[in-house]
Amino acid sequence: MAGMSFTDRNLVPRAPAGPAIPTGARTALLSWFAGHGVGATVIWETFLQREAFGSWQEIDEDVRARFGDDEADAFATAMNAHFERERHRMVAAGGVNYDAEPALKALPAPWFVNALEYALAFGGYGGVNFDGVKEINRVFQKVGASYRFGFDGQAQWHGDPGVYEQVLNPALAALADARLAGCASEFHAALRHLTAGTEKDREDAVEESGKAVESAMKVVLDSHSVARQGNETAF
């Protein structure tokens, strides 16, 4: 029970955020990183550099193509409101990108996860901020967001906690077997698509999952010396 608040201990859990990352969770994490020397300006400008974006139009077009019109319209609405507020700013501080925090709060959730991966690369041990990993996971667990970070600084799809513990973790443990290296590659590809979260990525996640199952079936048959032609499908 250590570290749990009164409401955590005594009230029903809040509604899980699922694949969304609420604004409050984003604000809390950006505040934590800023307090540890990695401000929103650094995170945002690293995101732009790593994702190879040079203009707002490029961002809007990519959001529309990969995440759909609703996500693109929501991002555009949030940023237009921010730009309107900025028109009335009287004082500007040097070295501060005032677009950074609003943009990070408005990004589609998978991109915000990318931004957190980039933030974790500043400081820490071996290039990964371990304290940052723990704080991200604490906040995501608090709001029920469907992502968790490993101490390699990489995000993984978490989903429902019961499914994670009873299905995903055992599967990952089994795939550590060297004979299942090909299956593991396909399964991890499925998880990456699931984390990205676009409609196309969800389709690709199903396809990669099917490939992983098919590859595993072949490994099992081979381990029992069952003759195969070499081109069998799962069917």
Image (spheres, rainbow, N blue to C red):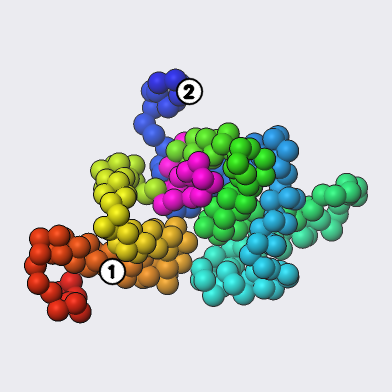
**CA neighbours of label 1 inside 10 A, class few (<14), some (14 to 19), many (20+):** many
- Amino acid type, label 1: Lys
- Amino acid type, label 2: Gly
Mark 2 vs mark 1: in front: 1
Q: Nearer the viewer, residue 230 or 164?
A: 230
Q: Nearer the viewer, residue 97 or 178?
A: 178
Q: Nearer the viewer, residue 59 or 52?
A: 52
- The magenta stretch spans residue 149: yes
> What kind of element bears circle 1?
helix
- The magenta stretch spans residue 147: yes
> Which residue appears at 85% of the width and 49% of the height?
95
Quadrant housing the C terminus: bottom left
> Which residue appears at 62% of the width and 56% of the height?
106
Q: Is residue 77 visible?
A: no
Task: Tell me the CA gap for discs 2 and 1.
Answer: 41 Å
Q: Quadrant of residue 108?
A: bottom right
Residue at label 1? 211
Count all numbered tags in the image, as a single digit.
2
Compared with 234, 49 (above or below) is above
- Say whether residue 175 is left or right of residue 19: left
The mark that comes first in sequence, 2 or 1, is: 2
Magenta-highlighted residues: 142-157
**CA neighbours of label 2 inside 10 A, class few (<14), some (14 to 19), many (20+):** few
Q: Is residue 214 visible?
A: yes
Residue at label 2? 3
Q: Residue furthest front?
A: 225
Q: Quadrant of residue 124?
A: top right
Is the Cβ of the residue at disc 2 closer than 8 Å to that at disc 1? Answer: no
> Which residue appears at 54% of the width and 52% of the height?
113
- Say whether residue 179 is left or right of residue 224: right
